[in-house]
Amino acid sequence: MALINEHFLRLPESYLFSDIAKKINVFKVTHPKAEIIRLGIGDVTQPLPGVVIEALHKAVDEMGFQETFRGYGPEQGYRFLIDAIIKNDYENRGISLDPDEVFVSDGAKSDTGNIGDILRHDNTVAVTDPVYPVYVDSNVMGVRGGDLLMDGHWSNIVYIPCTAENNFIPEIPEKRFDMLYLCYPNNPTGTVLSREELKKWVDYAIKYDVLILFDAAYEAYIQEEDIPHSIYEIKGAKTVAIEFRSFSKTAGFTGLRCGYTVVPKALKGFTLNGQKVALNRLWNRRQSTKFNGTAYIVQRAAEAVYSQEGKVQVKKIIDGYMENAKILREGLKACGFQVFGGVNAPYVWMKTPRGMSSWNFFEQLLYEVNIVGTPGIGFGPSGEGYLRLTAFGKKEDTIEAIERIRVWRV
Ligand code: PLP
């Protein structure tokens, strides 16, 4: 008899985006002619850059000839891509990495979700709240969640609220913890941490042996000068942090699938009797056992992102999304809403008016102006009273959304 991991049963049945889809479907039945603008799910809408398409075609052709065909590749990724990553994403910022500290994967969701494999089940996990749900749910599956409480918190997880009241800057909690997820630029709030604020967390982690899991999936959206792109820009971070990156939002790879994770060799975990072990060794073992590498053609496509032409094309796409973010941010502000984020991230986090709940405001926007956002409560208890809008929509839709809200608010 196979016993199941019953912690899966502790997770609430429905997932945020399926709840949203259900509500939209109900609305569509009663309002078949309404033209809905979707600024909810954080998926990109622009097609892949030309250099990526060219690289894909070329790599596909290679697969058709005996001399250039590739079978299984290295589980950790091909050197051509790892070298391009190190040179462009790290050395350009004064960070040196060895090739075997970078692990290419099929995206940051897998890596942030799987990293728990190499960590004990009884570590205490801390997350900023609101939070990208994968961090919490994967730890519930990994037996680190405890019980789901009535207020939406998991009993064994330490929540660090990030709200307008603390300017979305997480404060070090009193409760101790062993692992901390940080995501900057942040999904869902669209806010960032300054160098000093990030340094505060790295220093804390060094002092108390905390492992930081730093998700930099939106790094490419940083516009302001002094915002760190990598946690390794902070002194000592290589001894406490794993960094996750993704080509999804950087270069439109949400459907193509490629990301990478940096596990520095200086980063150590502990056995129960206090022996230090390099997490790099464990992650390498985990990947070699459970992952068979990202497709060659996809890695060639990712490599193309770093070409001179690739950088120009990618920047153009990101600039377009950031223009949307500006339209949303400024448009909503002009309508009297309190708005956060959207300066260094493709997400705008708005406060619901008159203390409305996230779901009530979601429905009001859907029914009155036919715009879909994401209720903040879906990202954690501190997201209540907020709604997330994404800048990944088409520009004309973004403009139209703001125009509808403007007319509605008059
Ligand atoms: N991390 C964060 C914070 C995200 O918002 C997302 C996607 O929305 C991911 C990771 C997933 O990225 P990927 O497409 O590389 O799996």
Image (cartoon, grey):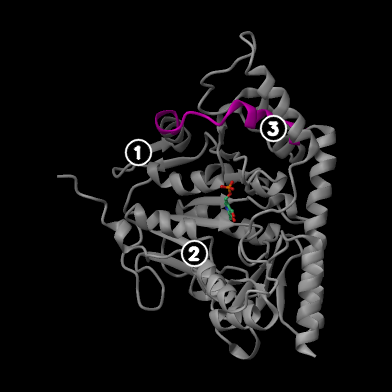
The answer to whether mark 1 is within 8 Å of ligand 1 is: no
Ranked by sequence position, the earlier of labels 1 and 3 is 1
Q: Main secondary structure of the magenta part?
A: helix
Dot in front, 1 or 3? 3
Q: Amino acid at mark 2?
A: Ser
Q: Amino acid at mark 3?
A: Ala
Q: Is residue 304 a member of the stretch shown in magenta?
A: yes
Residue to which mark 1 is pinned: 275
Q: Amino acid at mark 1?
A: Gln
Q: Residue 355: x and y, percent? A: 59, 89
Dot in front, 1 or 2? 2
The label shown at residue 109 is: none
**Which segment did they paint magenta?**
287-306
CA neighbours of label 2 inside 10 A, class few (<14), some (14 to 19), many (20+): few
Q: Quadrant of the C terminus?
A: bottom right
Which residue is more in the foreground, 80 or 374?
Answer: 374
Residue to which mark 3 is pinned: 301
Residue 375: quadrant of the picture: bottom right
